[in-house]
Amino acid sequence: MALTAAVGIGLLSSSAIALDAPEGPVILVISGNVGQPNVGDEAHFDKAMLEILAQHETVTRTPWYDGEVRFIGPLGRAVLNAAGATGDNMRVVALNEYAATIPVTDFENLDVILAMQANGKTLRIRDQGPLFVIYPFDKHPELLNEEIFSRSVWQVKRIEVE
Ligand SMILES: Nc1nc2c(c(=O)[nH]1)N[C@H]1C(S)=C(S)[C@@H](COP(=O)(O)O)O[C@H]1N2
Ligand SMILES: [Mo]
C-alpha cells in the first residue's frame, strides 16, 4: 500500500513537468531513452527552455581559459531530467561532429553543467557555445585528466542517451 502510493506520487510528479514544445531555434536535441519527448521521440530545447531550469554557477579554472571563469548553466542532470532521459551512457555530439561518451553517473554524482554563459556573457558559437560541458575541476582536482578533458565537449548540439 505504502509502496503503491509512493510509486503513484512519483509518476504524478514526473508527468507534472511535461516538456513544452520549443518556440525559438532549437539548440539542443536529446534522443534515445527519452521519457518526455516534445518533438517526435526526441526532446528539443530552445534557449529559453534551458534558461528556465535552475541555473548553477561553477567557478573554476579550466585548460581552455586563463584563470578562473564563472560559468553558468543548467546542471546536466536537470536537463536529462527535463527530457525524462535515462540510461547508462550518453554520446555528446558537437556542431563539428566531435563526440564523446560520458557515463550518466558523471551527471548524477558531479555538478556538471551545460554552460551557457562565461563571466556574464552568453557563449556564442565562436566562444565554444551555445553549450559547453563544464566539470567542477576546482572542487575536484582529480578531474584534471585527459579523459575528463575529452568529455568536456564544447559547441554541444545533441545528447544521445543509451
Ligand atoms: N566540440 C569539441 N569539443 C572538444 C573537442 C573537440 O574537438 N571539439 N576536443 C576534446 C578533447 S579530446 C580534449 S582533450 C579537449 C581538448 O582541448 P584543447 O584542444 O584545448 O586541448 O577538448 C574536448 N572537447
Ligand atoms: Mo583529448
Image (spheres, grey):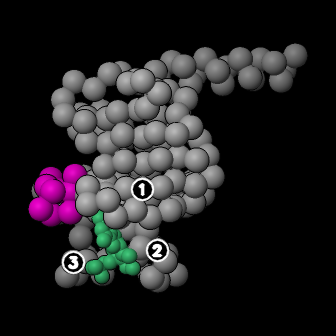
Q: Which of the two residues, 159 or 19, is positioned nearer the viewer here?
A: 159
Mark 1 burial class by Cα count in 10 Å: few <14, some 14-19, many 20+: many
Q: Position of residue 105 (x, y in %)?
A: 60, 57
Quick one: SS at disc 3?
Answer: loop
Under mark 3, the amino acid is Tyr
71 lies left or right of 80 = left
Mark 2 → mark 3, Cα distance in angstroms? 16 Å
For residue 46, which numbered disc appears in the image?
A: none
Q: Is mark 2 within 8 Å of ligand 1?
A: no
* Image quadrant containing the N terminus: top right
Q: Which of the two residues, 162 or 119, is positioned nearer the viewer here?
A: 162
For residue 92, which numbered disc appears in the image?
A: 1
Q: Is residue 152 magenta?
A: no
Under mark 2, the amino acid is Ile
- Check if mark 2's residue and mark 3's residue have beta carbons within 8 Å: no
Number of marks? 3
Q: Earlier in the sequence, mark 3 or mark 1?
A: 3
Is 37 placed above or below 79 here? above
- Magenta residues, start to end: 122-130
Q: Is mark 3 within 8 Å of ligand 1?
A: no
* Residue 4 visible to an observer of this rendering: yes
* The furthest residue to the right: 1
Ligand 2 in which quarter: bottom left
Mark 2 burial class by Cα count in 10 Å: few <14, some 14-19, many 20+: some
Name the residue beneath numbered marker 3: 65
For residue 148, which numbered disc appears in the image?
A: 2
The image quarter in which residue 11 lies: top right
- Check if mark 3's residue and mark 1's residue have beta carbons within 8 Å: no
Q: Position of residue 100 (x, y in %)?
A: 44, 64
What's the residue at 57%, 22% (across, down)?
A: 13
* The furthest residue to the front: 97
